[in-house]
């Protein structure tokens, strides 16, 4: 059997939207593959960022008849969902149905491998797994693919228990029709959970962490970075990053308790993301930033990065921080310990232990030599284990093996 050369493959990456952490990780993979000479296209259901010219919107080139068909399917599906949730907030829940037929899109039909990412509202389980002809790779950006309707267990609500069981049953029925599905766990935590799950446990699993462009996310002059954002030079800066700062899963309530151990006169909390928070410390909001170079400067401006997540997979923010040489303080949950080695490039506290997290922040902020050593080690780990080149080559090897003999 001869593996098809990765340079002759056509891959399509598929994600619901062009914003959020899952898209960012998938889009970085796309560029990593293209840099290695692989043809990789990107298909999204919703496109908000029109400046991304190498991303194609699912309905962008659809005919009038196709749009009508999707509209009718959507209306019928919405009635089905409304009946199922009985007035509960549907935004909290993900259903395994969609009016869209990914497998019928030209980019998908012309591809050798279909690589799924975050698929809420886009993937229709009943038709996709029955009709798709090519090998399918699915990267787990959260736990939803092997659970019921919630993206993470921390979002689960008791009143959804019966509905959640129903969704699991629907998924199980249609995943039974999948005969060439491979699962990628980007963290050891999510890999283990998926391998042990009823829904996905029977499929081959692969451990391939996300990658990052270490030529963009890199250490830079702290004083210059602070001048760029108009931040004070004489205070210790703690950086907190989340797409939505008030997302309960990101743990700001626990961080706020931790910050009470720090002096408002000597420390400043800087936030990067949508929304606002209040704290015992003074807060400087940088708002939401999409430009990678400006994001890298935010990490450079900070003395430490803090991640108090209650549940997380392989957070992009941690990878960005260590690539920029910024030590990390956080909770030992999910995939965070994959990237943060306690005592080497950061300090980890037991989950939801605000006092221990606060003491770790105090320790890091009060020891300049420790921070410098940990920052250097953080950069070393990012280059050695999380570069885009490493991630792309691991995917190329997997893709080639899946096309063996085809």
Image (tube, grey):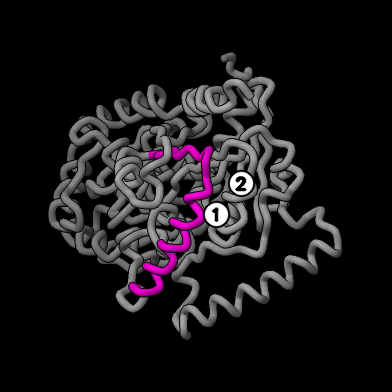
First in residue order: circle 2 vs circle 1: 2
Residue furthest to the right in view is 64
Q: Where is residue 401 in the image (x, y as percent from the top left)?
A: 53, 23
Q: Is residue 44 left or right of residue 311?
A: right
Q: Is residue 167 magenta?
A: yes
Vertically, is 46 above or below 206? Answer: below
Residue furthest to the bottom in view is 87
Q: Where is residue 320 in the image (x, y as percent from the top left)?
A: 43, 39
What span is colored magenta in the figure? 161-186
Q: For residue 247, which numbered disc appears in the image?
A: none
Secondary structure state at the residue bearing disc 2: strand
Q: Where is residue 215 in the image (x, y as percent from the top left)?
A: 52, 27
In the picture, which quadrant includes the N terminus?
A: top right
Q: Which residue is drawn at 69% across and 45% down?
A: 55
Q: Is residue 170 magenta?
A: yes
Secondary structure state at the residue bearing disc 1: loop
Q: Disc 1 marks which residue?
A: 119
Q: Disc 2 marks which residue?
A: 14
Q: Which residue is drawn at 79% across and 64% down?
A: 67
Look at the image and tell me whether residue 273 can be seen: yes
Q: Which residue is drawn at 44% across and 48% down?
A: 141
């Amino acid at each position: 059997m001869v593996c098809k050369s990765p340079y002759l493959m056509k891959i399509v990456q598929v994600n619901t939207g062009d914003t959020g952490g899952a898209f960012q990780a998938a889009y970085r993979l796309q560029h990593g593959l293209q840099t290695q000479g692989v043809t990789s296209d990107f298909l999204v259901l919703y496109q908000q960022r029109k400046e991304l010219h190498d991303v194609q919107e699912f309905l962008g080139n659809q005919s009038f008849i196709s749009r009508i068909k999707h509209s009718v399917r959507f209306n019928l599906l919405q009635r089905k969902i409304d009946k199922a949730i009985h007035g509960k907030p549907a935004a909290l829940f993900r259903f395994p149905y969609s009016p869209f037929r990914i497998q019928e899109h030209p980019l998908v039909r012309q591809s050798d491998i279909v690589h799924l990412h975050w698929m809420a509202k886009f993937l229709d389980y009943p038709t996709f797994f029955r009709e798709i002809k090519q090998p399918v790779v699915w990267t787990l950006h959260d736990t939803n693919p092997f659970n019921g309707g919630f993206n993470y267990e921390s979002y689960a609500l008791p009143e959804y228990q019966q509905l959640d069981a129903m969704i699991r049953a629907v998924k199980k029925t249609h995943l039974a029709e999948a005969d060439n599905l491979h699962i990628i766990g980007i963290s050891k935590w999510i890999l283990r959970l998926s391998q042990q799950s009823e829904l996905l446990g029977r499929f081959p699993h692969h451990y391939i962490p996300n990658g990052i462009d270490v030529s963009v996310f890199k250490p830079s002059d702290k004083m210059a970075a602070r001048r760029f954002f108009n931040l004070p030079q004489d205070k210790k800066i703690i950086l907190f990053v989340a797409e939505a700062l008030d997302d309960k899963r990101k743990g700001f309530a626990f961080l706020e308790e931790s910050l009470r151990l720090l002096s408002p006169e000597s420390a400043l909390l800087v936030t990067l993301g949508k929304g606002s928070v209040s704290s015992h410390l003074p807060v400087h909001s940088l708002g939401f930033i999409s430009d990678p170079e400006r994001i890298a400067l935010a990490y450079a401006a900070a003395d430490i990065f803090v991640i108090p997540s209650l549940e997380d997979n392989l957070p992009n923010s941690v990878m960005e921080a260590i690539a920029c040489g910024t030590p990390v303080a956080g909770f030992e949950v999910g995939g965070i310990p994959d990237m943060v080695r306690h005592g080497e490039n950061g300090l980890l506290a037991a989950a939801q232990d605000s006092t221990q997290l606060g003491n770790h922040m105090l320790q890091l902020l009060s020891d300049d030599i420790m921070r410098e050593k940990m920052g250097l080690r953080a950069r070393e780990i990012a280059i050695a284990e999380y570069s885009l080149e490493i991630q792309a080559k691991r995917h190329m090897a997997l893709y080639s093996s899946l096309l063996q003999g085809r």
